[in-house]
Amino acid sequence: MPYTPILATLGYVLSADGTQALMIHRNTRPGDIHLGKYNGLGGKMEPDEDILACMHREIREEAGIECGTTRMRGTISWPGFGKNGEDWFAFIFVIDDYTGTPLESNPEGTLEWVAVDQLESLPLWEGDRHFLPLVFDADPRPFHGVMPYRDGRMQSWGFTRL
């Protein structure tokens, strides 16, 4: 079967001092596979946009702010991750600055500033605990990971850096 993933973005907006990340607590939509979990912001790429435009649009839609400096930290392939076993492939970004005032919530949940060093204590997808340290570490090289899922559970994790 060919690998035909859904292309997406996942971004972490930092506070002005760089110590907090804007997270969404997915707590509003019954049936959401993310219900109860915290996540970065992002979503599916549209056919007429590049991946950076997708990241900026998703942040605008979900948080009501305009991205400034945006750094790609890596990519992750999630075979089997979707609600019906769809494959996902995401480009992971950090947004160092922005303009505007973040929304307090959106249709998917509540937006909350969380200390970067406390992210792993949140209810997250099991796999997020493996890649989040790479998103926020000081290594400037992007990481490229693969994290297969089966029946909503992470099966393995591996990554390389350029």
Image (cartoon, helix red, strand yellow):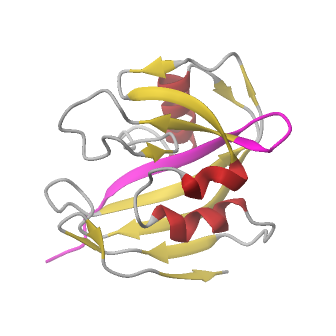
Locate residue 142 relative to residue 82 in the image: left or right. right
Residue 45 percent location from the top left of the image: 39, 43
Residue 22 visible in rendering: yes
Point 37% across, 82% down: residue: 156
Question: Is residue 108 highlighted in magenta?
Answer: no
| Number of numbered labels in the structure image | 0
Locate residue 98 relative to residue 22 in the image: left or right. right
* Relative height, residue 72 to residue 142 (above, below): above
Point 31% across, 26% down: residue: 28
* Relative height, residue 139 to residue 30 (above, below): below
Residue 43 percent location from the top left of the image: 41, 42
Residue 64 percent location from the top left of the image: 56, 19
Q: Farthest residue in the front direction?
A: 121
Which of the 4 image quadrants contains residue 98? top right
Q: Farthest residue in the right direction?
A: 17
Question: Nearest the camera: 22 or 144?
Answer: 22
* Relative height, residue 132 to residue 61 (above, below): below
Quadrant position of the C terminus in the picture: bottom right
Point 35% across, 21% down: residue: 107
Which of the 4 image quadrants contains residue 5? bottom left
Residue 120 percent location from the top left of the image: 57, 58
Point 13% across, 77% down: residue: 1
Residue 71 visible in rendering: no
The magenta-colored residue range is: 1-20
Question: Nearest the camera: 108 or 71?
Answer: 108
